């Protein structure tokens, strides 16, 4: 037997001088939303571009040098190259805009922490919606030139690549990324040395390397423990996104939160606004507090100073979706940290205590140590307020401080090029600066109907080419016959894309109900199999490898799709990723979404579809409850909360069938003499006009600036001035109120009046037992409904009482004369709550007494 050693060597091409900035383009993730930049690489070698996973940096490592020299000698290529560079340079020539936030000035920054970031398939450190949203947030911050940095983890294995076998079983394939071909570089100090920090884990210190990715004007710092000086276990901390057990998860979250703060400190970055996207990074707040305690503050004052400029966004609509850790795990990892904070173990655990559980809840920690909190749609804000109601125990959920900002998507990333071209031609190039101008987007009617329809058909044709390629590979790997493949692809005709296409593409979680349309297969047959009006239903998406019920849904879709009558009518496409998502949202005709209400926190895929002229057919949940106006798609009203699950699914699936059969299909196929449906085009145009200016990431980030970032920055400056004087003042005041509130009460002294004449005043008088508090420590308030109908409590008119004296029982007296503004029966309440002018939210103490 011959023994021999295999050696390898990689030969990288040398980039010609005339194309020297190609590498710069490849290392800035602006290419993730600039198609002209990506097309430069593709034009050099289209086949390699696909093989390289549309990764410009990997492409430049593998391309034949002769092709680079050929491109450098072609006039048309150089013209495109110079045009891209001109656009790139113009984008980066504009300096950061500090005037977005009053009082902001260099070196102020907003720091944005998230567990995953989804910019493009070439940087696989994301799994789904949370990461894509974080990526869009960064992209919009870059477009706005916002002084903004982001912090995350650099995983060797992002989310898995999915294959589906002939029986519908999902297989997860993980591959390690080669950092050499990712659009990242080591973060460097001014002297050229790499940035490293250290974190403490039980019994050991872990070294952390900081990497830097550039997203236009935004720097993303990614932390990595896969270093030779770390033992094997610690090198694996950043190995896999959402991998490992509870101990691995807490170590990842310690790295992100605590390590992230230390990384920013090491680089001299001093944020004045801190934003944690989900609770994974909440340990960041503890590390910031620890730093202040080390400077001499007591923990209560440090906590106020940290919380006041911290923004917390939650994306989870069910209590079980929030991260939590047992007391034992927390003790292992934070017993010493607790001493650094100079608080007792029970005080520390109380920071993460949610009623009904002894575990440490990361959402609770994030709420306790922030003063601005939000869900990601109006419904989700209400749901989150109810989930977290025990954190403000005496406040009704609808009034507690948990607010909402509805998500948005980055238009340049997800808007198809065909639409950009049409908008340039008929709306003018300024449409890019009119993202939030609803009136401007009514101009979309200027696009001729036949050109609009042609763009839609072109996008569907492009999608069909991509689906044919994926299904061909899927069929080959599963050893399917050519005849079977022909049956699958019979309606997927890029040359004649006239079939009505319904699309369902998202994570296969049970609450998303991928199989709802299979409730009544007989009815579904009538819908899909009409020979005069054919319908194609496309499914794509992944289930978490540990989610067995989610994988069962994939098997069920595969099973129904294999029924002889549904072959070629229902398609299950494997390998769902950002590229396929971009094709689907722009290519299908109708975007189907049928979650169990109210479990869809937001749902951004429908936004992407809507702005591409794809019509939404969705349950009124998440963003669609706000976006649907009766003219821009179709909606299914969710069943009431107390409806049996089986009855609910039956009723809601029936609504989908009826809308498809009676409205969607007839409208699509009601085509005029020019071969398209004028009604369909009208609705699709209106979908773009009504959704694009309202659900884009620019609007979202501007809303964060207006509602949260500006206030957080101002409060942070206010609390830290004069050696944290106001932080200390608020902490002492809260301690005083907390100690006294159990003995506080309120009673009414006047006799309630049942009827008065219009323009006369109601006189109110109450007596308050303040238990040592002062009148200016509280607000006594009348809540009155001015409408002649019931409205939500937080929509009542709020009128404050005046302090008038103290009675013989040492009660503090408050009075109010109030003249109703409208006639009719009024509902009102009397209440009292603690108040301090330095509070971020008037009800943040969570305390209240009612008469």
Image (spheres, grey):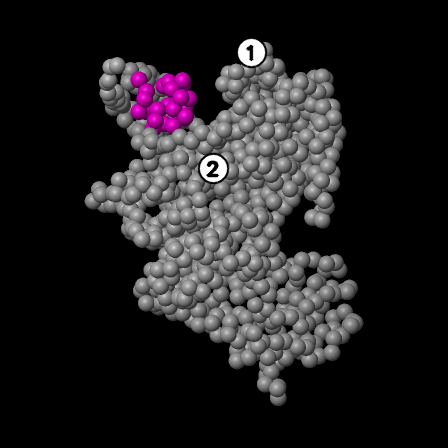
* For discs 2 and 1, the disc positioned in front in the rendered view: 1
Q: Is residue 175 magenta?
A: no
Residue identified by numbered label 2? 127
Residue located 55% across and 60% down the image: 355
Q: Is residue 696 left or right of residue 152?
A: right
454 vs 149, left or right, is right
Which image quarter holds the N terminus?
top left
Q: What segment carries the magenta color?
A: 39-64
Front residue of this view, candidates 551 and 374: 551
Q: Residue at x 72, y 17 (%)?
A: 532
Q: Is residue 662 left or right of residue 624?
A: right
Q: Could one spot residue 292 in this view of the protein?
A: no
Q: Judge whether residue 41 is colored magenta.
A: yes
Q: Which residue, as the protein is rendered here, is positioned at the far front?
A: 1
* Residue 572 x, y percent position in the rendering: 58, 25
Spatial separation of the CA atoms under disc 2 and disc 1: 34 Å
Residue 520: image location, x then y, percent: 72, 30
Residue 37: image quadrant is top left
Which is more toward the observer, 233 or 475? 233
- Residue 612 lies left or right of residue 660; in this view the side is left
Q: Is residue 30 above or below residue 834?
A: above
Give the residue pinned by disc 1.
482
Task: Indicate the secondary structure of the residue bearing disc 2.
Answer: loop
Quarter containing the C terminus: bottom right
Q: Dot 2, crowdedness within 10 Å: few (<14), some or many (≥20)?
A: many
Q: Residue at x 71, y 62 (%)?
A: 786
| Nearest to N terminus: mark 2 or mark 1 | 2
Q: Residue at x 60, y 17 (%)?
A: 488
Residue 228 found in image quarter: top left
């Amino acid at each position: 037997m011959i023994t021999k050693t295999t050696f390898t060597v990689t030969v990288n091409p040398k980039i010609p001088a005339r194309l020297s900035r190609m590498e710069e383009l490849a290392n800035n993730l602006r290419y993730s939303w600039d198609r002209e930049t990506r097309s430069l690489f593709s034009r050099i070698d289209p086949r390699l571009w696909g093989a390289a996973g549309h990764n410009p940096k990997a492409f430049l490592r593998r391309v034949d040098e002769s092709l680079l020299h050929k491109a450098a000698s072609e006039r048309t290529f150089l013209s495109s190259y110079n045009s891209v560079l001109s656009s790139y340079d113009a984008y980066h020539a504009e300096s950061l805009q500090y005037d977005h936030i009053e009082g902001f000035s260099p070196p102020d920054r907003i720091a944005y922490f998230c567990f995953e970031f989804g910019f493009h398939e070439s940087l696989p450190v994301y799994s789904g919606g949370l990461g894509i949203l974080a990526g869009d947030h960064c992209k919009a911050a870059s477009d706005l030139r916002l002084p903004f940095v982001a912090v995350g983890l650099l995983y060797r294995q992002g989310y898995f690549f999915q294959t589906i076998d002939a029986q519908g079983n999902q297989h997860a394939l993980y591959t390690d990324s080669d950092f050499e071909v990712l659009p990242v570089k080591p973060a460097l100090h001014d002297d050229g040395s790499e940035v490293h920090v250290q974190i403490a884990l039980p019994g050991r210190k872990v070294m952390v390397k900081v990497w830097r990715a550039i997203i236009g004007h935004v720097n993303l710092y990614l932390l990595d423990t896969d270093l030779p000086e770390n033992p094997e276990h610690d090198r694996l901390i950043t190995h896999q996104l959402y991998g490992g057990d509870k101990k691995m998860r807490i170590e990842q979250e310690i790295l992100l939160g605590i390590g992230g703060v230390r990384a920013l400190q090491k680089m001299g970055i001093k944020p004045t606004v801190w934003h944690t996207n989900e609770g994974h990074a909440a340990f960041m707040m503890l590390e910031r507090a620890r730093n202040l305690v080390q400077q001499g503050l007591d923990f209560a004052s440090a906590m106020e100073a940290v919380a006041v400029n911290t923004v917390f966004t939650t994306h989870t609509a069910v209590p079980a979706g929030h991260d939590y850790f047992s007391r034992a795990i927390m003790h292992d990892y934070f017993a010493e940290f607790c001493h650094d904070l100079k608080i007792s173990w029970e005080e520390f655990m109380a920071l993460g205590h949610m009623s009904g559980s002894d575990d440490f809840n990361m959402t609770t920690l994030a709420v306790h140590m922030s003063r601005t909190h939000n869900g990601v749609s109006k419904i989700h804000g209400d749901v989150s307020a109810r989930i977290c109601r025990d954190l403000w125990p005496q406040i009704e959920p609808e009034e507690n401080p948990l607010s909402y900002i509805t998500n948005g998507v980055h238009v340049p990333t997800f808007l198809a090029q065909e639409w950009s071209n049409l908008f340039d031609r008929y709306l003018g190039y300024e449409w890019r600066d009119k993202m939030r101008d609803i009136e401007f987007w009514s101009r979309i009617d200027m696009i001729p109907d036949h050109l609009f329809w042609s763009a839609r058909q072109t996008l569907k044709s492009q999608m069909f080419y991509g689906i044919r390629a994926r299904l061909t590979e899927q069929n080959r790997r599963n050893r399917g016959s050519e005849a079977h493949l022909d049956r699958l692809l019979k309606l997927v005709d890029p040359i004649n894309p006239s079939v009505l296409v319904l699309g369902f593409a998202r994570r296969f979680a049970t609450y998303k109900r991928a199989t709802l349309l299979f409730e009544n297969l007989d009815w579904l047959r009538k819908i899909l199999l009409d020979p005069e009006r054919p319908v194609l239903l496309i499914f794509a998406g992944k289930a978490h490898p540990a989610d067995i019920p989610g994988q069962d849904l994939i098997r069920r879709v595969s099973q129904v799709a294999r029924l002889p009558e549904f072959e070629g009518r229902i398609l299950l496409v494997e390998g769902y990723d950002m590229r396929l998502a971009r094709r689907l949202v722009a290519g299908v005709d109708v975007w189907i979404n049928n979650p169990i209400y109210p479990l869809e926190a937001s749902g951004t895929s429908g936004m992407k579809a809507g702005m591409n002229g794809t019509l939404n057919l969705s349950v009124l949940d998440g963003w669609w409850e706000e976006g649907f106006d009766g003219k821009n798609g179709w909606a299914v009203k969710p069943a009431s909360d107390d409806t049996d699950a089986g009855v609910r699914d039956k009723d809601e699936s029936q609504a989908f069938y009826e809308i498809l059969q009676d409205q969607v299909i007839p409208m699509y196929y009601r085509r005029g003499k020019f071969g398209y449906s004028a009604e369909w085009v009208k609705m699709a145009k209106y979908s773009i006009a009504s959704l694009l200016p309202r659900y884009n990431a620019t609007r979202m980030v501007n809303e964060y600036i207006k509602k949260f970032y500006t206030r957080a920055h101002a409060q942070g400056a206010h609390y830290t001035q004069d050696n944290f004087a106001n932080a200390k003042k608020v902490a002492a005041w809260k301690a005083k109120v907390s100690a006294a509130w159990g003995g506080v009460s309120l009673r009414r002294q006047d006799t309630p009046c049942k009827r008065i004449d219009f323009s006369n005043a109601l006189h109110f008088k109450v007596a308050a037992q303040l238990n040592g508090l002062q009148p200016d420590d509280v607000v006594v308030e009348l809540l009155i409904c001015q409408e002649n109908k019931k409205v939500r409590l937080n929509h009542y008119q709020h009128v404050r009482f005046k302090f008038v004296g103290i009675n013989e029982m040492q009660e503090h007296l408050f009075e109010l004369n109030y003249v109703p503004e409208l006639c009719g029966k009024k509902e009102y309440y009397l209440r009292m709550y603690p108040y301090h002018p330095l509070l971020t939210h008037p009800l943040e103490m969570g305390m209240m007494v009612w008469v």
